[in-house]
Amino acid sequence: MITGLNKLKMAATLVAAVFFINACGQVKTNSNNKAMEKETSVNESNIDTATFGAGCFWCVEAVFQRMNGVLTVKSGYSGGTVKNPSYKEVCQGTTGHAEVCQLTYDKTKVSFDELLEVFWKTHDPTTLNSQGNDHGTQYRSAIFYHNDAQKKTAEKYKEEINKSGAYPNPVVTEITAFTKFYPAENYHDNYFNQNSSEPYCKFVIQPKVDKFEKIFKNKMKH
């Protein structure tokens, strides 16, 4: 079983490797930064924010980083009571927080409805406080809406999925008002892209990325 604490131990051993990878891939990283700068040079009035929890935030980040119209993806914690929680605290399941990714996106390129479609089709929204071998309230399926429009859209979409019988069990995704986002530690950033050869990345994250790329070819960045 892959637990949050086991992932924490694995991540700790990868810190030195991440620094090495960053140094070796400096040219590529700079190129990616330039591409991001170009993409994010959009009218601020067209930029909106969405916050999703769908299990391990490494998985969520890897999927939405590849979606056209998504400008930034940041892993962090929302929905709990502890201020400025650490990854270790959240993994213990005592803070009330969910692992989430907060996205900024260009509304002229992608809608909140489209984000929700990817959200629900790239994780299992019917398992309570669990995704695969990751168990605990920190891995719950959750949408933290930022306005009434997002709330209505999420609730409507959830109701339609349940009525359609798309899943053998009912969707248990939490839909609740966004209150606070605490950014995760920096070593979580760009995690899959920098550690794709590690076991958790290969056997848990890669299949989700593959599924996204297969189902949503027309929504991928070029």
Image (tube, grey):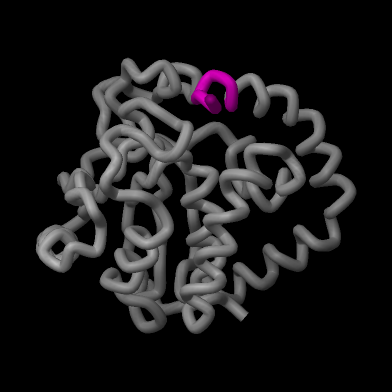
Task: Tell me residue 202's x, y (percent).
Answer: 68, 46
Q: Observer-nearest residue: 90 or 207?
A: 207
Residue 78 vs residue 208: left or right? left
Instruction: Decide: is 93 above or below 183.
Output: above
Task: Tell me residue 119's x, y (percent).
Answer: 36, 59
Task: Tell me residue 95's x, y (percent).
Answer: 32, 20
- Count of all numbered marks drawn on residues in the image: 0
Whether residue 71 can be seen here: yes
Residue 11 found in image quarter: top right
- Identify the residue at horizontal 52%, vertical 71% (top origin): 40
- Identify the residue at horizontal 54%, vertical 44% (top origin): 58
Whether residue 150 can be seen here: no
Residue 89 found in image quarter: top left
Residue 7 found in image quarter: top right
Task: Tell me residue 173's x, y (percent).
Answer: 22, 47
* Quadrant showing the C terminus: bottom right
Asked if the magenta segment contains residue 88, the reply would be no
Residue 38 vs residue 108: left or right? right
Residue 130 vs residue 17: left or right? left
Residue 63 vs residue 24: left or right? left
- Identify the residue at horizontal 58%, vertical 21% (top origin): 6
Magenta segment: 1-7
- Identify the residue at horizontal 82%, vertical 44% (top origin): 21
Instruction: Decide: is 13 above or below 104.
Output: above
The outermost residue toward the front is 168
